[in-house]
Amino acid sequence: MKTKLPISKDAVLGKAQAVVAKVRPGATEGRRSLPIRRPIEDVQRLWSDEAARAAVLDGIAVAEASLQLVPDDREGAGGSLATVELRLEAAVPGMATQALAGKAVRRLKALAETGEVPTTEGNPAARDDAGEETA
Amino acid sequence: MRALCWMGINDLQVNTVPDPSIVNPHDAILKVRLTTTCGSDLHLVDGYIPGMREGDVIGHEYMGEVVEAGRETTRLKPGDRVVVPSFLGCGSCWYCEHDHWSLCDNTNPKPELQEPVLGYPTGGIPGYTHPFGGYAGSHAEYIRVPHADVNCFQVPEGIADEQALFLSDAVPTGYMGADFCDIQPGDTVAVWGCGGVGLMAQRSALLLGAGRVIAIDRLPERLALARDKVGAETIDYSETDSVLEELRELTGGRGPDACIEAVGMEAHGTGPQYAYDRVKQAMHLHSDRGSALREAAMACRKAGTLAVVGVYGVIDKFPLGVLMNKGITIRTSQQPGQRYMPRMLEHVQKGELDPSFLLTHRMSLEEGPRGYEIFKEKRDGCVRAAFAP
């Protein structure tokens, strides 16, 4: 017995196409914000330091990176709200640009709050790339 | 050095790997003295929690001896005997300052792998997948501990390695579960699971003032530990038609004031719901077998508290309506061991808490794969296997 579907094949295809059309194309620009428990001047000083900035952007193919800082009293007196904005060298899919901007602003926060960026550099493992920082 | 490595699903091997070294100025290198299996490791071994890479060193519950301290550490020196809570804190972010150490903002090197699932990343933990940081684990001769000043706790004279070991994870996880229950003197607390964490949750509930603790499991040797070592009453769920009915009768029809779920995503059980969960999980159509969690939610009295300390992925069929309609408070977290460490050390020193009975199988690191096999299959009365590298 042939079963008649309650919806036509063309209708299903149309729906699928509509969903696919909503998927964001690759982007080169993204931004992320985080509170940092350090005064604006300290965070700005880190961002201006070549070595510190290199640590924050390590492994991210960045054409341009900028930092905006505004006061954030919720994190305690003198805290900052930092926004890192990235323009990448090439487009990456979906929300990946935001994820990379998030990685950068988290590294900046860690560096400002603790004096170091968390890393798996030197990590022991039983594979050829043991010791390399891996994303 | 030698290390126990995850080489694939259900494939653990002891391999030679590079030694760790100081990378950041607040690091310390420990020689691992004891490191133990944890039930949550089985989710990685079995492949239900993704994010492992072939060759990763596993293990996150350990204690050891400082062999080298980074130049900006101030509280540690070589030779110090220390225990380290599994989740790493930085001691500086808002979460650490508010004692939510496992939620640290600054210790997970790979937050972008966790954000798509959790929204916001947790702190890092060694030996427990790349989304949780990718740090090499403790089943090795040496381990690097970031932010060592705030994560390494000196083990006082008189506390044995076997006692200190479990203050790394099993005790603080169980203690946190009991703490979450806001226990009033005389309360009845039911605990699902008599593994390391469950037994410690039971003991902690009594320490925090519970009048009765009722432990639920199916393994006779573990139920015996709950009775003999903890002082709990027990229910063997495989010998009863309904745990719910048993608990109702044991509490005069009222139900336990608080329930602690210390089983997690690979719960065993009976009946059709368990069969459904088991099949669906085996086919990777969902990540969790949640029968213990659902049963605990049903059993809890109205306006009671449900503390979830078992490890879960993204469970489906979560009984929110049961909790909502009965006005149950649910509390859960990964354990912030740094919050509880001073209290736990004091309990051990006073003789009120001795977790060393959890160590049923002491082995060399080379015996690691066999240790996990015995632990996973719960053979030979195994509660925990621990390795002395």
Image (tube, rainbow, N blue to C red):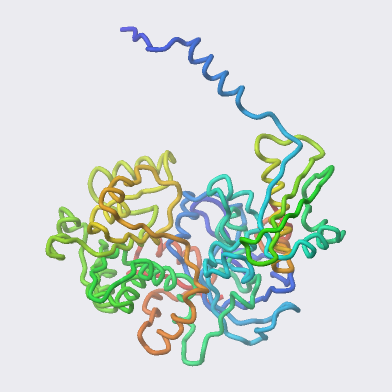
Q: Report which quarter residue B371 is drawn in.
A: bottom left
Q: Quadrant of residue B203?
A: bottom left
Q: How many numbered circles does the render carry? A: 0
In the rendered image, which quarter contains the N terminus of chain A? top left
Residue B144 seen: no
x, y (%) of residue B170? Answer: 43, 70
Taking B20 as reference, is B112 above or below it? above
**Is residue B272 placed above or below B307 in the rendered structure?**
above
Query: Compared to B268, does B158 lie above or below?
Result: below
Q: Position of residue B354 (x, y in %)?
A: 38, 82
Q: Is residue B102 left or right of residue B190?
A: right
Residue at 74%, 78% in the rendered image = B72
Q: In this image, B158 relative to B244: left or right?
A: right
Residue B110 appears at what percent x and percent y? 65, 54
What residue do we see at 35% from left, 75% from top? B204
Decide which of B379, B276 is in the foreground and name it: B276
- Asked whether B338 or B3 is in front, the reply is B338
